[in-house]
Image (tube, rainbow, N blue to C red):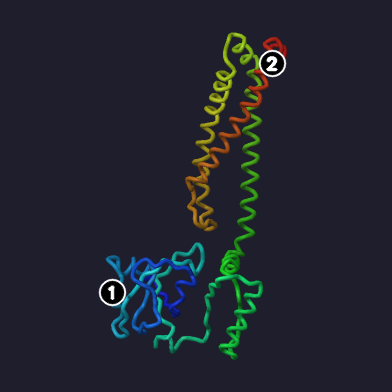
Amino acid sequence: MVPVAGKFVTPGYFDATGSRLLAGRGFSEHDQPNVIVVNETFARRYYPQGAVGRILGRHDVAEVVGVVGDALDQALDADPRPTVFWLLAAPQCSGCNNVLSYVVRPAARPPNLRSLIRGTITRVSPDAIVVEVASMDERLTGSIADRWFATLIVVFFAVAAVTICAGGVFATAASLVARRTREIAVRVALGARPSQVLRLVVRDSLTATAMGVAIGTIAGVWVSQTLRTMLYGVQPGDPVTTALGVLAMFGATAASALVPAARALRLSPTEALREE
């Protein structure tokens, strides 16, 4: 059974956090404690036919007045939990602890914003102890700090692997095309246009590369499954990422074929034959 999380919030909470309102409405200043808002996961799991207007609970009856979008408030790789939002002034909060979190969305960002927030809280509640004042970006960075170094190492080796692979493809294809200097010279001497020769050379190089790229793509998609826990907002074998890798290899092959072919075209047939 999936546990249901409960949060006590004020009417301005959803606006401050930028939560998307999917159905119904949020809290207002005139609401009674017996109204609640649920998140998308809760509504989809328990009220797939529509959550707004449903009655929750057997004893402490509460009416669902709105549905908001899910938020990754636990971890970026953790699925959102079914969540029920209660008004902070509701009787159910009488037994909750005295630890409160404030979400502030200022219209401007003065350099002393942290001091202003601390000062405001202290003036309203002199006995309050402000533990931390942090931006959403800082909290996000802190939540993934333990994985940052590991991800950085993986990215470094990935870039190195792509660079070495592209360099190897370039060198191999360039060597193969350079060996065809005599053939290119003969084709030009027989009346072939430079554009025809270039298309032929590039086509042959890309054809030879296609099989290796196909095998590498399949292997890459399979190996990427092991990196699932380090990916956020993208799935292993992501089509866009895979397509960029394939294009990089084909681009390196095309460049490696064009450079020696263009050099051979600049030679006269006699010079080309002499090089062989």
Would you identify the image quadrant in which residue 141 lies?
bottom right
Q: Tag 1: Cα neighbours inside 10 Å, few (<14), some, or many (≥20)? A: few
Residue named by callout 2: 267
Query: Can you say whether 250 is above or below 43 in the image?
Result: above
Q: Residue at x 60, y 34 (%)?
A: 252
Secondary structure beneath dot 2 equals loop
Q: Quadrant of the N terminus?
A: bottom left
Query: Can you say whether 130 is above or below 219 in the image?
Result: below
Residue 95 location, x and y as percent? 44, 88
Residue named by callout 1: 53
Q: Residue at x 58, y 70 (%)?
A: 108
Residue 172 location, x and y as percent? 64, 29
Q: How many labels were placed on the picture?
A: 2
Would you identify the image quadrant in which residue 36 lies?
bottom left
Residue 39 location, x and y as percent? 39, 70
> Hey, what amino acid is under mark 1?
Gly
